[in-house]
Structures are given as structure tokens and as C-alpha cells.
Amino acid sequence: MESEKPKNGLRISRRDFLKVSAITAAAAAAGYAASKNFVFDIFSPPVDDEQLQPGYQYSYAPNMCGICSSVCDILVNVEQKGNYIRAIEIDGNPLSTLNYGKLCARGRSGTLITYNKDRLKKPLIRTGPKGTWAFKEAEWDEAIQYILQKFQELNVQPWEIVLSGGAIPCANYRPEFIPFTFAAQIPTIAGSPMQPCLFGEHLGMNLTIGTFDIHGDELADDFQHSSLIVLWGNNGNPAGIFVNKGSRLGKGLANGAFVIVLDPRQSEAASKADLWIPVKPGSDLAIAMGLIKYLIDNNYYDDYFTRYHTNAPFLVYQENGVYVPYTANYEDGTVQAFYVYDEISQSIVQVPPYTNTNMYSINGQTIKPALRVQNLTTPDGKQLITVFQALEQAVSQFTIDYVARIADVDKSLIEEFYFRVGTMRPIDFATGQKGQEGSYTTMWRKAIGIIMALTGNIDVRGGWVYSGDHREGAIQLFQTYTSMVNSGQVKPGILIQRPQVLMSVPVLNLPGQMMQYVATALAYCNPSFWQHGHPAVWCAYNSTLTSQGLKPAAAFSLFPDTGIYEATQGQVKWNGQPYNIKVIMTCCVNPAKDMQESNWKQILQNTFVIMVDIFPTDTALYADVILPDATYIEREEPITTRGATPDSGYRRRWQAIPRVYPYTIPELDLFVLLSYKLGFFEQYVTWMANSLGLPADQLVQAMQKEMMPFVQYFEKYGTYPRWGEFVGKAFVDVQSQIIAQKLNTTPDVVLNKLRTEGVITVNTFEDYVQNNERIPWNIPAGLPTGRIEIYSTILYYYVVQNFGYDPTWDPILAYIPPNWNAGYAVTPGQFVQPQPPYNDPTFKPTPPEMFYIEFKIPPIAYTFTTNVPILEAITSNSYHTNIYQFAWINKETAQNLGINEGDWIAIISKLNGAKLIMRAHLTEWIRPDTIGVPEPWGQNNPALTYSTRSLKNFGNRAVTHIWPQSYDPLTGHRMAQQFTVLVRKATPDEISEYTQLAQVQTQDTIPSQENIPGNYTT
Ligand code: SF4
């Protein structure tokens, strides 16, 4: 990208260009800040000779990619001539330590999302049956009046509304959306992909190290400094979809790291590996437990880290089948101290309830806590062992021989894997998405967290390094706790028993698990938090199930879709009354496809659906009102933090071009406008301020001031101004002053730097190391005890105490067999005993019965990228089509079944008969007993020009169609791969049924009928 093309005697590289623009942009940014009438004085353009059209001026606007939760730092390249302006290209910001100037194909194609003929351009109101395209165009006022009228007709109460948001609200707009629910008193959010990713795939690790969103903003896999990188069922993250991980992985490979991939399929990641282990689906937890045993048996664990910085030395005793911490308690029953055995004094001593180290007793005496003890009992005679010993017991059966039989791979592969993990340092096990999803997933991920802790790879270069954002939250929490204890406001205790401490930190500044705990236990599942006394529907569903003697369907989750379908079927009760769901409001999410397809089609069929989006996704086929959103390069937004990089600092979205369509309204403004119209504006803005620790009165004032011109413009013209966004502007007015104070400079300097460089770095990881701010080496982790928790105190003190014991949420580690076609995959809340042969962990199906896995592909994921012409072209070129759009089936297996390359096949769940009809790709790169399905296809809305082209290969049902209607009792994620399938050739009738598009009743309202206009500055 370092172009050196000569032009008019000037040689300029992109880096030089950035320097030049840094100077010239300063003046223009100030002009912009002063602008009051929506005319964007785009910053003074320097010449960029990478662009050669005479008379055009070229410039960059820093922004953040809005496609997936990697939220990479980008530069939008804009060309301008007179009043013509257009975004022509998107590059990675080379100053970013998040993505190091790199982008994926999706990020690069971002302009084609904005200039996409299928964009939603005007509000639409349904005129015909759901499931069809039948709309009339409407003015905004008309659309909003229609919504209000329906709310009145249906007598909608706040708890009867579900707000559903996808990766974009989750990764970008938590500070705005969570406060909206608080102010509007809407307790239910159904996030996607929150439920499968943040819970199904992350919770186990989060409970161990204290994070919440480890792929989005709280943890950096520091691959570039790793000696060993393990990518486990994980193509979707480093090699598939997250550039923040992928760019580091690239550096790690270049630096010679040894890479091991465990995956039944040779994925993109596996193709780069030194060792690919094609493990059997469902064997991951056994392999991880075998590795823990191997590390302990061979003394390959880090004794110092395990002893002092984890809770492995805590003494525990068994009670009703669960290990319970041995503690000294206050009169109110809360924990005063944990007990450990001190090898120096050879006695049991108390250690503080919340701290980062076990080096000192509660009296400040230096101790050496034992990892193993013998013949210790409580005063009432209960046998005591350490958490470390309980862990040893839990993994004792997983010898290498047994693991190799379960994993169905050669024993030598397991031996090499274990030996390398035992002997190489530093190590990084890739965090993130797409492993097997069943009831064992949380325990498997917890085991990975434990492996990283036992090997001391937490917050070290080459291992898992906390992001600057997370670290700042952990520091703030630690300081708050210390000051409240020192001033006598609270007694020392574990954080979840000291809500006063947690509530004294703005909720969105809390480090991961503590934020989740507050949001789950103290807000969304707490009926008294809500004026109407109704918790979120999933919490009500937990109560409904447990009152019937069943297990919950999401004991410790946040924003799952659990219980929504059941509520629409009259199966959820609260205080003896039906918990109804009447309205679904979606924002940048496609639940008709992203969540369980059959359930959600019924939910959307039976509720009033308001959809805010940029594309007519399949959810649009069920929407009653559609409100058109703006894209991320058409927006100006609040200043935010730096995401999943070890650095802390600031960045923001700057609007690069005027909004292409005058009837689109950026969603942040839309939500505040709704609160204004509905009369809870001040509460909403106050919640936003409080959640982030901003001065509420100043933000309310700024918001009022910035909003009114937009309201007046809107009332006068019925459309929205093309430049500017009042929410972003109001936030920036307040934030820039606070940041300037912190950095000892002026707001203009802050804004100019953000405008010209896109990012401000305040502290690097090295700064934090120098300041003694490593977690848990110097400061406590964001967990109740402050240590890395091999024993999860959240699972014990919150989940076990509320819901009893279940192996799914064992506080240490329990083996959960795959339970094929049984377990919790059959019906919500009920464990079904697997029948032979499915009760044997070494079970392997014989084709046509096969294991089923899903995988991500690099060019397409999430709502926004399924309809982009260039991505469609990449995935359908002659080399890629079969790899990216067909189901992967082993060549020999296929031949035995009479299936040829490109044949249409039926993949039928043995559990419930649901099926996918798609074409077959024959390959040696997948196990013979496993069929692999690429996940992002299956749309059938004729309004999607590019998306529906995959119909000819994949059919019209999303992969979620085959998921059983069942929930993991801990996280609420669907048992998306806990079943076997039967595979055969598809019949002509099946092919015909599965390649139909939805009916069109009003052709003229399909958005692509309208041409894309030119792009002008005013
Ligand atoms: S990984 Fe790709 S799509 Fe995701 S934020 Fe980065 S550039 Fe955008």
C-alpha cells in the first residue's frame, strides 16, 4: 500500500499523506465543529496520487468498521469534485494497534453496503400477509403514528416488547442500547449473536479470567509473541472473521510460532497449521481434560502462578455432590475470608476475600499456600482438599489412551499436542467463535481457561493479554473497592456479595464478568429493578420451568432469546399470569435466520414487528413496519474506547459522506427521537450518562441543544439532514472536554487528533507493565475473588445457590459427554438420558448417519455482508463456489452413498427430522463421519439481489433451521450440534421446495427498483 507513483513532480506515500492530512485536517475539523447548518466542510483535501482523476480531490475520514464485532479501525477514502462526493474505498488505519492497517474482504467492500441497490430507502408499512413482500412506502411521521396506534390497540406493556439487536448494537452501541431498555422499562433484549457467541462459546473462559466479550473488546490474543498457537475448532475467529485476531495470527506465523489446529475439518486455519488434528466432534472437553491431567501429572504447570494468582489453593469440602469453599463468614453469612493451608506455618490460614494474590494472609503475614493437602478436616469433620486436588480428581480418568479413543485420532497426535503445550511458552489458545455447540461447551471453554491459567499465560506477552478497556475497568473497580473498604463504607468481601461496590462503578465501565453479573442478577433478572415488577422473559421462563421441577433454560446468561417463543405459545408465566410478548423491535439483526429459524418465523408471525435496518433481510418478510437506517460511513458518533487491543485510548466514527438516501435516520438518533416523542428523553439520556460515568446534566443539556435543529429540520421537511448526528455530536461535546482534562490538553486538540489519525493511544501494554497494572499479577481480576478462578465463585454463589447443582455448571470442572440426540437437546429444562450407542463417548456413526458441524467462511458473515456484490462474486467464483457454498462431505463417504460433486443432498436431523437441502462438495479435508455446513446462507427474500443467488447452491433455509428447539440450561444457547444427521440424495420435490423465493405482492416497493442517486455534499 506504500504507493510511490510520481504525479506532477510530487511523490507521496500513504503514510506521508496521513501526515499531511494530519496538519491540514486540523483547521477543517475546527470548521466542522463550528458548523451549525448541516453543511459538512469536509477537511481540506491534500493530493493523494494513488488516485489519478484530474480535478478530483481525495481525502480520508477515519471510522470504525461496522460489519462485525472486531470493529476494526478504518479510513474511508473519499473523492470530491465541486459538490459531488463519494466514498470510493475503505482501508485499514495503519496507526491502529487493533488491526494494524489490515482489513478483511468484508471490511474492504464496505462502500458497496452503502451504495447497494437493495438498501432500504424509505419507511415501509405492511399491506399484505406476513411471509410475503407486501408493503407501501410511508413518510416517517406516518410510520411512527402507525406504530403508536398499534401499541394502543394492542395495549402493549413494556415487558411485552423484545428489543433485538445483532453484532452491531452489541459491539458498537451497548452504551446506548442498554440505557434505552432501562429508561423505556423494556426488560428483554434478544441479542444475536450474543446467545451462541458470548455465552455458548465464551462463558466458560469468562468465568475463569473475568472477561465478557473476549472476541470483541476485552482480550487480545497476543499471537505475534507466542511460541505455540492452538486454534481449537475456531476457524471463525482468527482465520475466518476477525481481523483483530487474524492480523496478530499473521504476525505469529511470520515469527515462527508453531501452530496446532484441532478441527474435524481442514479449515483455512488448519491449512496454515504445523499440526492438524482432525478430532471427532464432541470430543473437545475430553481432550481438554486429558491435557489438564497431563500438565499436572508431569509437573508442566506453572507452580508460582497457580499457587499465588489463582484460587487453586482454596480449601473446599463436598456437600450434596458439589465442592463448597471453606470460608470464614460474617454474621450476615457473607464471606469474610477463604481458607488455605500455609506450608510455612503449617496451619490453615485465612486469605482476603478479594485480592490479586494468595501471598499474604488476612493479617498481612507472608504465606505459601499449598496446592495439595492431606488429612485436613473442618471443625465439624468434613474432609478438606484444595481446589487443585478437586481439579485433579475431575480429570483423573482422562488418560491419553482414553482421550485418543474418544477423539478417534492416533494417540501420537494427542501426545504431541500435550507435550508441546507442556513444554512450550508462551502459549495462546485462540479465543472466540465456532466450536461444537452442546451442553459440554461451557465446561470445554472453562477447561481452556484453566489450561491458560495453569500454564501461567494470563496477561503475558504471547498469551492472553487483557485489552486496555478491560484493564481500565478492573483498575477502577479495584480502586473503588479499596476506597470503600478503607473508609468503612463496606466490609471486605467477595464482589458479588458487595453490590454497593459494584453499583458505585458505572455499569458499562465494570470489567466483563462483573458487568454481566450486575446486568443479569441485579437488573434484567431482578423484578424489583423494574417499575412494573417483570424481569426479562428468559428469567421468567427459568422460574416457570423450575416451578415445574425442571432445570432452567438460561441460568446465567444475558440477552438470550430463550423463552420468547415459549411466551408466544402461552408457556411462560410470571406471578401466575401469562407473560405475553406482543412486539418485536429488531435493530440490525436478522432473527428469522440468525436465531432458530422455525421458532422465529412463528414468533415474527404472531407479533407486531418493527424493523430498523439497512437491508431487506428475511426478517423484513415478517415486519409490519420497516425503518431505514444509515450505514456506518454515513454516521458521526460518540467517542469510544479502543476495542480488543492491549492499548487504551480513544477513537470514533467520523461521517465520511452525506447520507445517500434522505429518508434514512442513523439508529442512535432514531432511538433518542423515539424517547423524545414518547416522553422519556431525559431518563434515557441520564441513563446513558450514568452507565458511562459522564455528567448527566451536561449530557442532557448538550443532547437537547444538538437535537432541536434536527427535530425542526425533520418537522419542516419530513426527511433527515444528510450530514451530522445529534447523539454523536452531543456526546462528543461532553466527552472531548473530559478527555482533554485527563490528557491535560484542549478539546480541539483531542478532536483534531481523532480526526486526523483516527485513534489516540493513552497507555500501551508496556506502560501498564511499568505501572504494575497487570491482571492478576498486580491488580485483581474482574471476578468476585480477584484471582483467576479455577473454582468459579459466580457458578457457586449465584447459579448453584439459586438453581442447585448440575454438571453443566460445576464450579470446578465436570465431564459432560456429548449426549448425542439426548441430554438437554430434546426439550427445554429436561435432561434426557442418551440411549445406546449415544451414551458412549467413543461412539462414531456409520454413514449415512453422520456428525454435523457448521463453520464460518471468511468472506461472508452477519446480516450486512450477505448482500454485497463483490463478496457474492468472491464466494461464487469457480474455485470458491463448492468450498464456500456447498456442504463438505468426505470423498469416500460420498462415493459409498452414491453422492457426486454438486449433487443436491438432504441433511436430516435424527433428533427432530428438520432438514437442510443443499449441494455436496466432496473432499478429503473432512473426517469421514462428519458433514460440514457453511453457515451464512439460506435467505429467500426476493428483495435481496445478491444474497438469494446462493439459493441455487444452498437452498432457502438457514443453518439455524436444523437446530433443535432446546436450550443449554446454563447459558441458553441452542444445542446447535448435539445431534447426528442422516445424509442422502435430495428428491426433486425437496429441491423445488427448498429453492423457492418468497412471494412478491408489491413489486414497486422492492428497494432495488429505485436507482442509486449521485452523492452530493448538500
Ligand atoms: S474483521 Fe472485517 S468485517 Fe469485521 S470489523 Fe474488521 S474489517 Fe470489518
Image (cartoon, rainbow, N blue to C red):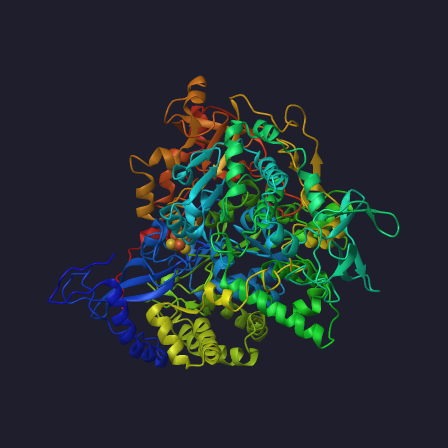
The quadrant in which residue 891 appears is: top left
Q: Is residue 535 left or right of residue 467?
A: right
Task: Give whichever of 30, 758 is nearer the camera.
Answer: 758
Quadrant location of the C terminus in the rendered image: bottom left
Extreme residue in the left direction? 8
Task: Give whichever of 199, 416 is nearer the camera.
Answer: 416
Q: Residue at x 53, y 29 (%)?
A: 851
Residue 321 x/y as whole percent: 78, 42
Quadrant location of the N terminus in the rendered image: bottom left
Residue 826 x/y as whole percent: 65, 35
Position above or below: 983 against 1003: above
Extreme residue in the right direction? 380
Residue 777 x/y as whole percent: 58, 60
Q: Is residue 829 visible?
A: no
How many tags in the picture?
0
Task: Give whichever of 672, 74 is nearer the camera.
Answer: 74
Q: Is residue 244 left or right of residue 78?
A: right
Q: Is residue 286 left or right of residue 638?
A: right
Position above or below: 638 against 572: below
